[in-house]
């Protein structure tokens, strides 16, 4: 019940125990095509360039940034938590001229502030986190695509924390690139990064494409500004997933099975139903924590559905309580980073764990741990408030 | 029965269906420490810095090169097949001043030629493929470490194709960095890259370490020449696997279970026994192919144990025969790249497929496919020759 990674759905675990097939076996390329189609549904996009990067969600972020950013490009990063700092860090390593705007952790940007920042910095690319699990807040993105389009900037969003359990609308919002991982609302293991790219983003890649020595044909151009990474070169990864099927990495077969099963489960349930399920159980958890007399962290109107921050009460040893939750009840909850380390816990309700029994058991256990830690709690206050939230 | 990826060992597939635990759960960090110890055994090394990179074998290669190469560094790449070209490509993207030496595909370098090349180019790093599956040959590396040490160069070797089924002796040969994947002799899926680094290599990383914004303490230095990648920054990955346990990527739990199980299976069998098994079944396959009247490709004295190249006989449609093997017998064999595409088939006997029944069934099927393709073959010639090899 941490902020992710979380328990995987048992169906996903079983999918990974299927035997492998060859990398260019028609069965395998069929699974790849199926996976592309499934993730178009998950991302709500018609983008042909929708596929997997073989690495964790961080590999997906770096693939997007290193492939879209040419050294010297101006990049704007609005930061409202730790993962915004990560985007800044990666963009800097890509050689970008990075400009940042920051708001205090626990808040998000207004659309007007974002537009002003874009107008002031005139970036080639805006890179933003959608849901920053470090603060549990989600930056509303429904207006940012139009802002970027007006100012001629590409828009990249890291939707790792939100995809599948919060509204994410790639085409509706005008995102040019979005990347995720499986280990949050998708209910799978870390290690595969779904990605989608608009035609505008693909045009940038097309201009930077360089086919590697040993695979190059006579007619293949060499790019003026080749992508600095080979492994995370999205132009090459597209040539592998696309019709040309040019050899690049050896697709991680078991992780592809996992990613495919995550999307199948999600689309069987229905995206809207899955988001609503996350909203329901997240709200019940939040109500239960308040029912235990605890104070929630941050602007609750911008909170992610799938994770809630709660202030560690005075007098309670935060790490000791987390250890007791894990050791005595087998339940993991998280702390946070930087200014919030030791100040808040983060409790997740996502993917396979966005369930009534998981919420109520966590609240029951936390009540016991708080009481034994010397904090006064109303008996049944957490579970009772959560049950009321469910009843409403 | 291709050159890899191949069928995974069923034990590895089952290991991946185990439930996940949190990233910093003591159970998980325990598995990480166990995995480090296991791979020290697999690589035959005492290197403390032995761990996994979360990506395919290509991610491991790029992690080693981008972390060890500073832009402008002179790098020597001896090339004897397609994957040597890949090292050149990646080193170039890392900003290295790359010098290459090439020998015809199907041959390898003498130690004298390597020493001359090192003396002429005075590189900071020599990057070489051990077994280049594109040609099926393995470059002997037992003298190269001493050569590099004499000339003050670091030595990196890509042992993806060979580890676990051919002699690989990281400490004995003086390799400073070696990377692999699971999808060859280790009998697992692609998607995790074991890596080991000598203390000399770690010293290079220490000089380039930069801890990312949001995790940095007051005393943490900022490097003069930071590593260009965040995801593949081995200094950061070491800080995550090491005692400091600094958050970096979210470890790919299921792939870690797979990597751990691959190593457990291998060390239970014994490294020497596993290499001997690959040698036995590889030799039987080679004998069987000759028994079918086919000609083996390349310098057989330098052939990898686990894959053999065989010339496609005149009059046979190579891709048609491969399709018949797959469709009619459920057996995959490979073609090759570049100058060898359509000229040779590559047949693997590795990992879980280094088995007598797999060898004999493949030879029996190939005989049928060749005959139906109009090529004259002695009935039973392949299986008979393989059985004789086994009997000897």
Image (cartoon, coloured by chain):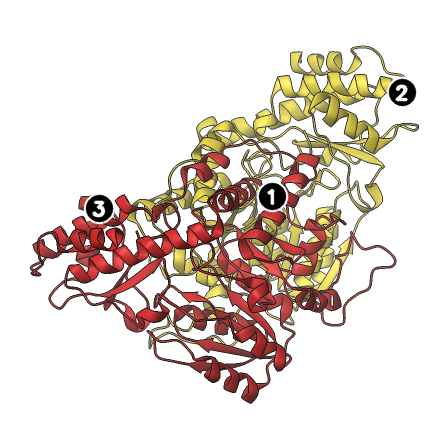
Chain colours: A yellow, B red
Q: Is residue B276 visible?
A: yes
Quadrant of the snapshot with the C terminus of chain A: top right
At x 14% / y 53%, what residue is drawn?
B367
**Residue B282 point in image, percent of width and height:** 31, 56
* Residue nearest the viewer, comparing B88 with A93: B88
Please state the total of marks drawn on the protein image: 3
Q: Are marks 3 and 2 on the same chain?
A: no
**Residue B336 point in image, percent of width and height:** 31, 65
Label 1 crowd bin: few (<14), some (14–19), many (20+), radius 10 Å: many
- The residue lying furthest to the bottom in this view is B120
Q: In the figure, B9 relative to A155: above or below? A: above
| Residue for badge 2 | A375
* Gap in angstroms between the C-alphas marked 1 and 2: 35 Å
* Gap in angstroms between the C-alphas marked 1 and 3: 46 Å
Give me the chain letter of mark 2: A
Residues marked 3 and 2 touching at CB (< 8 Å) = no
Quadrant of the snapshot with the N terminus of chain A: top right
* Residue nearest the viewer, comparing B219 with A141: B219
Give the label on residue B361, or none.
Answer: 3
- The residue lying furthest to the right in this view is A315
Find numbered disc 2 in the image and state the secondary structure of the residue it sits on.
loop
| Residue for badge 1 | A160
Residues marked 1 and 3 touching at CB (< 8 Å) = no
């Amino acid at each position: 019940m941490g902020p992710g990674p979380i328990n995987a759905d048992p169906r996903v675990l079983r999918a990974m125990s299927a035997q492998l097939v060859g990398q260019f076996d028609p069965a395998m390329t069929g699974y790849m095509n199926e996976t592309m189609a499934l993730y178009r549904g998950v991302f709500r996009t018609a983008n042909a360039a929708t596929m997997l990067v073989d690495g964790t969600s961080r590999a997906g972020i770096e693939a997007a940034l290193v492939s879209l950013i040419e050294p010297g490009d101006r990049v704007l990063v609005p930061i409202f938590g730790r993962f915004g700092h990560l985007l800044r860090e990666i963009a800097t390593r890509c050689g970008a001229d990075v400009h940042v705007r920051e708001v205090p952790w626990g808040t998000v940007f207004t659309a007007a502030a974002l537009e002003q920042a874009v107008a002031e910095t005139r970036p080639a690319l805006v890179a933003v986190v959608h849901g920053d699990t470090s603060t549990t807040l989600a930056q509303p993105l429904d207006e940012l695509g139009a802002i970027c389009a007006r100012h001629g900037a590409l828009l990249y969003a890291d939707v790792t924390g939100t995809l599948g359990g919060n509204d994410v609308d790639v085409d509706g919002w005008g995102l040019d690139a979005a990347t995720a991982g499986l280990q949050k609302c998708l209910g799978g293991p870390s290690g595969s990064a779904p990605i989608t790219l608009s035609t505008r983003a693909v045009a940038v890649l097309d201009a930077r494409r360089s086919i590697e020595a040993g695979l190059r044909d006579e007619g293949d151009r060499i790019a003026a500004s080749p992508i600095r990474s080979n492994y995370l070169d999205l132009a090459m990864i597209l040539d592998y997933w696309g019709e040309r099927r040019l050899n690049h990495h050896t697709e991680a077969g078991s992780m592809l099975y996992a990613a495919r099963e995550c999307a199948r489960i999600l689309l069987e349930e229905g995206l809207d139903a899955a988001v609503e399920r996350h909203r329901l159980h997240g709200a019940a958890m939040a109500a239960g924590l308040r029912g235990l007399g605890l104070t929630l962290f941050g602007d609750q109107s911008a909170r992610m559905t799938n994770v809630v921050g709660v202030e560690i009460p005075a007098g309670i040893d935060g790490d000791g309580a987390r250890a007791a939750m894990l050791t005595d009840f087998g339940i993991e909850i998280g702390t946070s980073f930087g200014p919030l380390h030791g100040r808040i816990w983060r409790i997740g309700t996502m993917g396979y764990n966005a369930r009534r029994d998981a919420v109520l058991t966590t609240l029951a256990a936390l009540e016991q741990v708080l009481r034994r830690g010397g904090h006064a709690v109303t008996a049944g206050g957490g579970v009772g408030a959560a049950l009321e939230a469910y009843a409403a």
